Image (cartoon, rainbow, N blue to C red):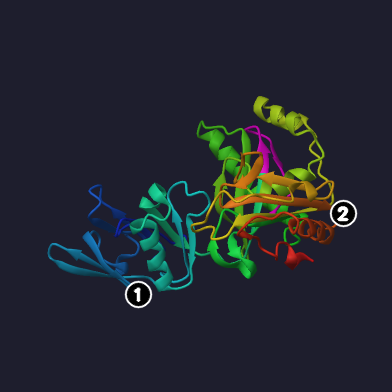
């Protein structure tokens, strides 16, 4: 418990689990099974942080102290200097279709996020339990890899855009676009991520008797201190895959078979040295409420080589209509990222439906 990292887990209106680094021992707040009390245990090396054990409900919390209501009265626990409640990330502890993360820039935003997720049911059952953690500062990148449980073959890196509006404004989404390769992840950094993140993770799963075969997705933040893991997924990512696979020169079926059969080290995986760029066309209002059933036009008008991936669509009466929040992803490849970006946006303009919305800054920082 020497790490300075910190996180909170909230259940209903009650704090469930909280860890802050405090001296060497640190301390942990653990919610009781009855879900209406809070136990606080303090590490032996950090007695100044607060009492050894307290049970009660959370009365208030600010940047310097936590107040717990107990049967004998309020108990105040002094928080360490690094215990900030501003600039937090809220993530639902469940499946939320990519909409379960809120980056709060203030105390008010943090409280509002908890209220919307847990009291208003913004993401349904997934929001009944919420994880609140430190916000990492940097640029996000996705590194996917094939693994047969022993061997690891990283794919080309990709960078997606989570916020719904240009300039990374607005709420988080499942992804509004993606490009590959990101210039801020050079070859040496890719190798470092493979050595420090991907390989140890695969080895650890095998060591625990749970060898994993398939696609390992690592969502990373490139910070001033190096790459930090945000999340893992046991699948291809969306919209990263739409930008990554068009650059794959090898046979995907052959790679998948080798992955499943444990022969990945015998397969040569090659990638195109060019670039790709994908733009998501979303329904107006997404990731909030939106209307469905709007006819999509222009699908047959895109240039040769342009890929259009369907996500929230359906066939209805001989037409293709909108069905979901993220409707389509239009992808282009090129010798350079600038070329791929110009091609994709020229074709995005040809595909239309009522309420259509898309970000206009995908890969702009690279060209």
Q: Please rate how many residues cluster around mark 1, counting C-alpha atoms within 10 Å: few if below 14, some from 14 to 19, many from 20.
A: some
Residue 153 in the image: state x and y as whole percent. Answer: 71, 40
Most foreground residue, 315 or 253:
315
Residue 119 in the image: state x and y as whole percent. Answer: 33, 58
Residue contact between numbered discs 2 and 1, judged by CB atoms under 8 Å: no
Residue 186 in the image: state x and y as whole percent. Answer: 76, 57
* Front position among marks 2 and 1: 2
Q: Residue at x 81, y 61 (%)?
A: 342
> What numbered label is drawn on residue 313?
none
Q: Residue at x 75, y 34 (%)?
A: 252
Number of marks drawn: 2
Q: Over which residues does the magenta segment extend?
A: 145-159
Side of 52 where 360 appears, left or right: right
Residue 146 part of the magenta segment: yes
- For the C terminus, give its image quadrant: bottom right
SS for dot 2: loop
Residue labelled with disc 1: 64
Q: Residue at x 68, y 35 (%)?
A: 151
Q: Find the residue positioned furthest to the front.
A: 317
Side of 232 where 301 appears, left or right: right
Q: Find the residue positioned furthest to the top.
A: 261
Side of 67 where 330 appears, left or right: right
- For the N terminus, give its image quadrant: bottom left
Does label 2 or label 1 sit earlier along the sequence?
Answer: 1
Q: CA distance from mark 2 to mark 1?
A: 53 Å
> What numbered label is drawn on residue 335?
2
Q: Residue at x 51, y 48 (%)?
A: 97
Asked whether residue 194 appears in the rendered view, the answer is no
């Amino acid at each position: 418990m020497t790490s300075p990292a910190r996180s909170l887990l909230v259940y209903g209106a009650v704090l469930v689990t909280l860890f802050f680094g405090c001296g060497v021992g640190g301390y942990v707040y653990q919610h009781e099974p009855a879900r209406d009390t809070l136990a606080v245990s303090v590490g032996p090396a950090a007695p100044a942080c607060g009492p050894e054990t307290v049970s009660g409900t959370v009365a208030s919390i600010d940047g310097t102290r936590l107040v717990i209501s107990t049967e004998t009265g309020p108990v105040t626990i002094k928080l360490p200097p690094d215990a900030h409640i501003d600039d937090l990330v809220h993530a639902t502890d469940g499946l939320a279709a990519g909409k379960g993360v809120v980056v709060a820039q203030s105390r008010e935003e943090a409280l509002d996020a908890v209220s919307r997720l847990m009291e208003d049911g913004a993401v349904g059952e997934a929001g009944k339990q919420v994880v609140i953690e430190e916000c990492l500062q940097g640029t996000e990148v996705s590194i996917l890899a094939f693994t047969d449980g022993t061997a690891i073959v990283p794919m080309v890196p990709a960078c997606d855009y989570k916020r719904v509006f240009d300039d990374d404004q607005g709420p988080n989404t499942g992804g509004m676009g993606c490009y590959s390769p990101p210039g801020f992840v050079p070859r040496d950094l890719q190798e470092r991520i493979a050595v420090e993140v991907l390989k140890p993770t695969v080895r650890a799963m095998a060591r625990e008797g749970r060898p994993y075969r398939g696609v390992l997705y690592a969502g990373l933040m490139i910070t001033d201190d190096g790459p930090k893991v945000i999340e893992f997924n046991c699948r291809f990512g969306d919209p990263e895959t739409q930008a990554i696979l068009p650059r794959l020169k090898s046979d995907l079926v052959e790679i998948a078979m080798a992955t499943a059969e444990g022969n990945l080290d015998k397969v040569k995986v090659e990638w195109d040295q060019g670039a790709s760029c994908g733009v998501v066309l979303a329904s107006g209002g997404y990731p909030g409420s939106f209307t469905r059933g709007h006819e999509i036009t222009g699908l047959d008008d895109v240039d040769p080589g342009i890929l259009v991936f369907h996500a929230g669509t359906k066939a209805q009466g001989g037409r293709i209509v909108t069905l979901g929040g993220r409707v389509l992803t239009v992808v282009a490849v090129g010798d350079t990222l600038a070329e791929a970006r110009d091609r994709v946006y020229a074709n995005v303009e040809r595909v239309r439906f009522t309420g259509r919305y898309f970000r206009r800054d995908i890969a702009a920082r690279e060209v």
